Amino acid sequence: MAMLRAAAKKAMAVVGTGAPQAASAFSRTLHASPDSKKIVGVFYKANEYASLNPKFVGCVEGSLGIRDWLESKGHQYIVTDDKEGPNCELEKHIHDMHVLITTPFHPAYVTAERIKKAKNLQLLLTAGIGSDHIDLKAAADAGLTVAEITGSNVVSVAEDELMRILILVRNFLPGYHQVIKGDWNVAGIAYRAYDLEGKTIGTVGAGRIGKLLLQRLKPFNCNLLYHDRLKISPELEKETGAKFEEDLDAMLPKCDVVVINMPLTEKTRGLFDKERIGKLKKGVLIVNNARAAIMDTQAVADACSSGHIAGYSGDVWNPQPAPRDHPWRYMPNHAMTPHISGTTIDGQLRYAAGVKDMLDKYFKGEEFPAQNYIVKEGKLASQYQ
Amino acid sequence: MAMLRAAAKKAMAVVGTGAPQAASAFSRTLHASPDSKKIVGVFYKANEYASLNPKFVGCVEGSLGIRDWLESKGHQYIVTDDKEGPNCELEKHIHDMHVLITTPFHPAYVTAERIKKAKNLQLLLTAGIGSDHIDLKAAADAGLTVAEITGSNVVSVAEDELMRILILVRNFLPGYHQVIKGDWNVAGIAYRAYDLEGKTIGTVGAGRIGKLLLQRLKPFNCNLLYHDRLKISPELEKETGAKFEEDLDAMLPKCDVVVINMPLTEKTRGLFDKERIGKLKKGVLIVNNARAAIMDTQAVADACSSGHIAGYSGDVWNPQPAPRDHPWRYMPNHAMTPHISGTTIDGQLRYAAGVKDMLDKYFKGEEFPAQNYIVKEGKLASQYQ
């Protein structure tokens, strides 16, 4: 595994030209074994929920279940949820941490400025999928390695997308609201409740998650479409019956439901702006568990208010945590949650195991699985280019 | 099609022994063609929702879209939602109606007393599935025909069940509540959110709806079990991977999720009482879109409160509409709605077409499709025996 920053650091140490900052880092290593690393984890805090499930490893208190293992190897492991502003806990450790582990659910935003300060930093690990909280270009320029636990929660997210499709198509929430309000009005739900069967579902992106979604949609007898840079395998096309749409703007007006399954990159940021949303079928339903910044926030809220979008469900927001006045909290016909789909207990256990495995490889100087790299040797993975 | 009551009526007319009630009915037929029938439909009222969707035929205002057709054939068609108490609209027509069409979503309860009053009644049609709102024994004894639009909304209900399984397993609602309350606490959702993959799902009943559910669950890679009087076909067992469990009480403790897919009969009424619920796995999730009276209402509420049942979702209540103080409105971790799953717009269009087809056969004296009969020639269909 190539770690350009690490190599540069070693060279500095050898020639003795460390800046004060580097010297300070050096002095700290006197108190630890020569290979001791400082690892910082930024996770969401569980508070009263931490003790309710022994498998709940994805929170600050659970710390991915790797504290004993890391400390037994002589490494330092700092875990916090305090990630914003100049006086946050994360900022205290930026200058001398070697590894930062964070998640898309409570992302530590790794800006170019933070990367500049992080003189010892070698590895940025995303416990989950989606590393857009990192300035990937700055990370590449600084010689950092960025890697995800690819595949750790793809099933979790695909299941969640199918749930959201059904919640919107079948108009679940108005019925639930009636129940808790003491009402009973079947007509008020039924006039806009549909079966999924026979509808046209288009996924924008058919990577690992999109493919799993298509497989799960297959028995519902829908008309399945997908748009991506590449076609899925002929076997999977045959298995799912999904049809390739090379031109996104030709696919979108056909869809009763649009599902977003692409990473956030400079090309996809704001892809669904007012103009493109205007070209969607009137009454379209949108599911987005990918990244919120692929949508124009206000354009989505406006189209929900006008009824052009008949329902919007997702668990991704810009920024996260979503502020109390975020318009998506208030728009009609939404079925939003905080960022949760990839952090089920099952997902947590998989990405915790993946983080441990990759740290082990990092300590041993071994390569990661190829598909896990987002930035390697100064280059971005293809989906982020 | 045998209509014992009709035959008896004709015999009475021939011999001129009509009671005052029958004579009154006879006088009315003077104003209509000899084959004119009085048909009463009891549906839910849509009010302001009626005009919002031209396909919304399942409500009083939509009247299944068969008014013009019926009236052009000289029949009388009364439609109402007013079905309870001695002075309701339905009561005014009981003595001389020939056909009553009703739905499980807003059921007209056809008691032995009402059947006794309904001297002209020949046919009870359920627009949907589930005729337990009718006293079937009394209907059989009176020589009535009871028929459903079997198959009209099985897809609708199966899809809805899968939605509810996902909503419970993935702990959707606490996240949604956070959003609308202005909160953000991923841990408060994640500590009890799971993937469906790998879990054990048992369906109690594998008739038309249960089979469709098993097919839709297949790609989720669960452990699928089913209990029924009969095994499903070897082909469907192979396709779905579902395993037959002859002994219900042997299956139930294995299940992470239990789905109820059986009709309400005297054998299934109260099947899930306090004792049987106590034998379920602690933390079990239950989905019931079949009939509420299969469960002991208070036992379900108590087990939700204690946490023994970790989530309960369904759209069936006892009685319907559910009163404001129904305990299922207030129990923790529920995901209840009014009775809606079978009355999507797609379902409505199918059962409206089915009702029209069966009325046409009734007018012509033709047989219904065999699977649609619930009571025929004094005998109950096998699932109700």
Image (cartoon, coloured by chain):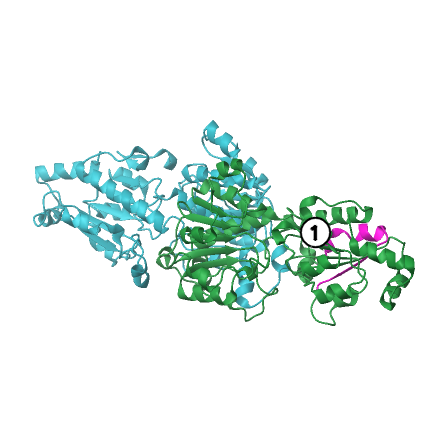
Chain colours: A cyan, B green
Q: Kindly identify which residue carries mark 1.
A: B54
Quarter of the image with the C terminus of chain B in it: bottom right
Above or below A201: residue B14: below
Q: Position of residue B114 (x, y in %)?
A: 73, 65
Instruction: Locate residue B242 relative to residue B345 in the image: left or right.
Output: left
Q: Position of residue A35 (x, y in %)?
A: 12, 42
> Could you tell me if residue B314 is visible in this image?
yes
The chain identifier of the residue carrying mark 1 reads B
Q: Position of residue B148 (x, y in %)?
A: 68, 51
Q: Nearer the viewer, residue A177 or B233?
A: B233
Q: Nearer the viewer, residue B220 or B188?
A: B220
Q: Position of residue B34 (x, y in %)?
A: 89, 54
Would you call the spot at circle 1 few (<14 residues within 10 Å), some (14-19), or many (20 or more)?
A: few
Name the residue: 30% across, 62% down. Answer: A47
Q: Amino acid at mark 1?
A: Pro
Which span of residues is magenta-colored?
B60-81
Residue B74 part of the magenta-drawn span: yes
> Could you tell me if residue B343 is visible in this image?
no
Of all residues, the one furthest to the top in this rendering is A234
Q: Nearer the viewer, residue A344 or A119?
A: A344
Q: Nearer the viewer, residue A69 or B96?
A: B96
Instruction: Locate residue A268 relative to residue A77 in the image: left or right.
Output: right
Instruction: Locate residue A150 relative to residue B280 in the image: left or right.
Output: left
Residue B378 part of the magenta-drawn span: no
Query: What is the tally of numbered marks visible in this picture?
Result: 1
Name the residue: 22% across, 45% down. Answer: A99
SS state under label 1: loop
